[in-house]
Image (cartoon, rainbow, N blue to C red):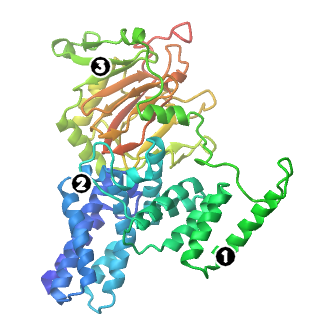
Amino acid sequence: MKAMKILYILPVLVLFSLCQAHTDFFTSIGHMTDLLHTEKDLVISLKEYIKAEEIKLEQIKKWAEKFDAVSETAIQDPEEFLGHPVNAFKLMKRLNTEWLEVENLVLKDVSDGFISNLTIQRQYFPNDDDQKGAGKALLRLQDTYNLATDTISMGNLPGVTHKATLTAGDCFDLGKVAYTEADYYHTELWMEQALNQLEAGEESSVDKVLVLDYLSYSVYQQGDLDKALMLTKKLLELDPEHQRGNGNLRYFEYIMAKQANQSATSDSEGVEVTERKGRPKDYLPERQKYEMLCRGEGIKMTARRQKRLFCRYYDGNRNPIFVLSPTKQEDEWDKPRIVRFHDIISDEEIAKVKELAKPRLKRATVHDPLTGQLTTAQYRVSKSAWLSNYEDPVVARINKRIQELTGLDMSTAEELQVANYGMGGQYEPHFDFARANEPDAFKELGTGNRIATWLFYMSDVAAGGATVFPEVGAAVYPKKGTAVFWYNLFESGEGDYSTRHAACPVLVGNKWVSNKWIHERGQEFRRPCKLSELE
């Protein structure tokens, strides 16, 4: 029995060392892999409890077998498994919701082993915000990549290795995530999917009446009164005494009668029906162009311009190191000029950078233009860490390589930023440089504006995750071991607004990148100023 208690405590110690305080798990696949190990430990603990207490409760066995099957598959390749957004969402749901159901079942017994273990570990589990964030990530992927609800529910995503499906209960939970945001467009889509799966005969604890209640209301909020009335009648066929359903039926019939008595030009005062139907109003003006580029659509370069792009061996402007061993350089775009360096960072260097960064990954932040402070934002979903030159020879070697290939001074550049994108991980269109209305953006650094950006791709991405430039229509796709480089400022020091770019949501896979933001100070003789601001 003492040995068993030691077994129960070990996962707690491991977990405590990994995450002493809750963080936004869903924003980093790298951190979510730790949760899979935690979940595996819980499965083992659950099995040991069942064996030790000789309890043959069939319901608990089913839970154990379900979790064990998922964990066994996932633990073989955690990052690839969590690269499928449905798997990542269901991990959030299992640890936030379903393990609580297991706890409630086991609480019927007075034994303390498994319960004490699970109760202690629960304080380090994903919370409601994580489950909600994972749900919103799935909705974001659905919109960006024009995915039908049944496509996601059936797990038919490109490039997946571990196919995963959504139950009617999962679909219902996604609809509720949208509902809490007053996003009735997505509420309707996912409540309909839940209803379709229930009507197809899927067994579920979700009540069809409850689904119809949400569905009819979300349809009404979008202005489709006829459909709302039809759904309400369908609800009342299942539950004739449903209080809200009967109230809604009378109200809908009253509105329709009132509308029938009005002329086409009469004022519809008192009819509380939203005219808009579709995706919620957006704050991003180039949303359509941005999402088209993420899908591989949109602006294409003319054949004449395409012919001017070349691949070459590059010696870093006759840098002695690269004269004997030049690098492979490829033109990705002409204006702004974006170049890709191939085989520029090794697998061993990537592994070391990830090893150094992973324990320090924190939710990525952005500058709030109103307060000037760093804050988290829905338009940047990832975790990042900063690595200094002195921390490891690999970091120093990488920084030196960037300096040799760009010819720019790295002594005033920012530290190497490492980022790992989570479920639907993205960074919506933004500028790397400070505009005229942000004179104090980098004041505390004292190194001037960001003159250029160097971006390493440290993983391949099965689907999605491109770096796109909506102003010009460029799309650069992740390829492990490569890096892309561009200037944010003209030689005059004026900002190049065509460099506005974005990291598209990761549809399937795990995206690791690291970047170097290079500043103006120290580049005066390396990149002299020109007289014309556009030169």
- Mark 3 lies on a secondary structure that is helix
Name above or below for residue 255 compared with residue 84. Answer: below
Determine the image quadrant of residue 420.
top left
Q: Residue at x 57, y 72 (%)?
A: 235
Residue that appears at 71% across and 66% down: 252
Q: Amino acid at mark 2?
A: Pro
Can you give x and y, in whole percent of width and height, for residue 290 in the image?
Answer: 50, 33
| Outermost residue, top side | 531
Residue 246 is labelled as 1
Disc 1 secondary structure class: helix
| Left or right, residue 535 beside residue 17 | right
Question: 219 or 28: which is nearer to us?
Answer: 219
Q: Earlier in the sequence, mark 1 or mark 2?
A: 2
Q: Is residue 3 above or below residue 96?
A: below
Q: Residue at x 36, y 9 (%)?
A: 307
Classed neighbour count for the residue bearing mark 3: other residues with Cα under 10 Å, few (<14), some (14–19), many (≥20): some
Can residue 276 be seen by looking at this rendering? yes
| Residue position marked by numbered label 3 in the rendering | 405
Secondary structure under tag 2 reads helix
| Number of numbered callouts drawn | 3
In space, the residues marked 3 and 1 are separated at their CA atoms by 72 Å
Q: CA distance from mark 1 to mark 2?
A: 49 Å
What amino acid is at disc 3? Leu
Pointer 2: what residue?
78
Q: Nearer the viewer, residue 426 or 90?
A: 90
Pointers 3 and 1 in contact (C-beta within 8 Å): no
Rounded to the nearest angstrom, the CA distance separating label 2 from label 3 is 35 Å
Residue 423: % across, % down: 38, 50
- Kindly identify the residue that appears in the image at 61 percent across and 68 percent down: 232
Q: Quadrant of the N terminus?
A: bottom left
